[in-house]
Image: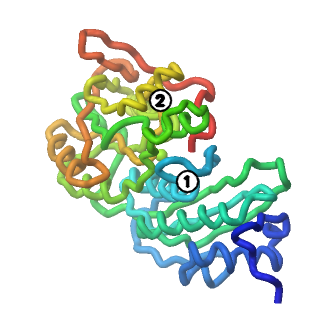
Amino acid sequence: MSRRLDLVNGVVELAHGSGGRASSQLTRELFQPCLGNPEIDKSDDGAVLSVEAGRMVVATDSHVISPLFFPGGDIGSLAVHGSVNDVAVMGARPKHLTAGFIIEEGFALRDLKRIAESMGEAARGCGVDVVAADTKVVKRGEADGIYITTTCIGMVPEDVHLDAVNIKAGDKILISGSIGDHGAAIMACREELGLSGELVSDSAPLHELTQALLESGATVHFMRDPTRGGVATVLNEVAAMCGLGMEIREQALSVKEPVRAVSELLGLEPLYFACEGRVVVVCTADGAEKALAAMQSHPAGKDAAIIGEVADGLPHLVVNNGWGGKRIVNMLTGDQLPRIC
Ligand code: MG
């Protein structure tokens, strides 16, 4: 009988990703207590899932964030929320999750345990099971700590039909809360901007909020979570999808003071900063108040606001400053905010 893993001072070794005895010890002693459930505990090559008839959504997302631990979350909880939210904004109810881990040799087992615990807690909070997982270990220097890819599966209720092609001029644009909290928190940690403590990531699951919204009776045409590239990128994408302009009012956007400070230090619009717990919604004008009330009645959407409307004209994002000035905000070019999620 080999010794148990040293979860205090031990590190991940190449053998832990070999598929042999060390791999199964890592699974048994570290991952299973955090992520275990009857399906994954069978240790088969794949999970057999019973699903309802209907439309299934599948979304996958890789997480390479640096730093791994940040105010408001860590790569484990983020990897769960990331895929769950992608399924949620498609109008689906998230059900199952898979996870792939790429770990650098020498990574501290206590950090891996902390990440696995956080993933387990986040998954339970979202009501999803991690039904399949894989671990690979690469040599020191061939990766930076740990990368996690998650895939989430969910089912779309029969009466939900979201499609950007249904967006019409006059539709309203809403967002569920303040913008840029995640991106600003990560940049502040990384660049040591001296604002730590004030900035907290908004990383959170959205599936309950999106369900409440879809059940509100409002006619929702489109939802998307403004992650990498922020609200500006989502609104440029939706403009391109429906061929209409997106016009938002600067004053309607909630930007926390420390987020604004980071944006000024970096010379970047907060509209480009990633959110990890917000949803952008486009719905018909006559349903907007109903949608807003449904969002505000959920804790994740208490600061929701109507921020603008869909306009005839070129498929651009136009920001109105409220003083008669309008400017076009394009998609972010290049990679100015790498490894933000
Ligand atoms: Mg997304």
Q: Which residue is mark 1?
A: 74
Q: In this picture, is 333 found above or below 61?
A: above
Q: Nearer the viewer, residue 158 or 331?
A: 331
Q: Is residue 222 left or right of residue 241?
A: left
Q: Position of residue 253 (x, y in %)?
A: 30, 30
- Ligand 1 within 8 angstroms of badge 1 C-beta: no
Q: Amino acid at mark 2?
A: Tyr
Q: Nearer the viewer, residue 7 or 141?
A: 7
Q: Nearer the viewer, residue 169 or 134?
A: 134
Quadrant (top left, top right, bottom left, bottom right) of the N terminus? bottom right
Quadrant (top left, top right, bottom left, bottom right) of the C terminus? top right
Q: Which residue is mark 2?
A: 272
Q: Position of residue 295 (x, y in %)?
A: 24, 49
Q: Nearer the viewer, residue 169 or 75?
A: 75
Q: Position of residue 258 (x, y in %)?
A: 41, 31
Q: Amino acid at mark 1?
A: Asp
Asked where in the image residue 254 lies, by quadrant, the reply is top left
Seen at 27% across and 54% down, the residue is 299
Nearer the N terminus, badge 2 or badge 1?
1
| Tag 2 secondary structure | helix
Q: In this picture, is 8 found above or below 280?
A: below
Q: Is residue 180 left or right of residue 1?
A: left
Q: Residues within 10 Å of mark 2 (few under 14, many from 20)?
A: many
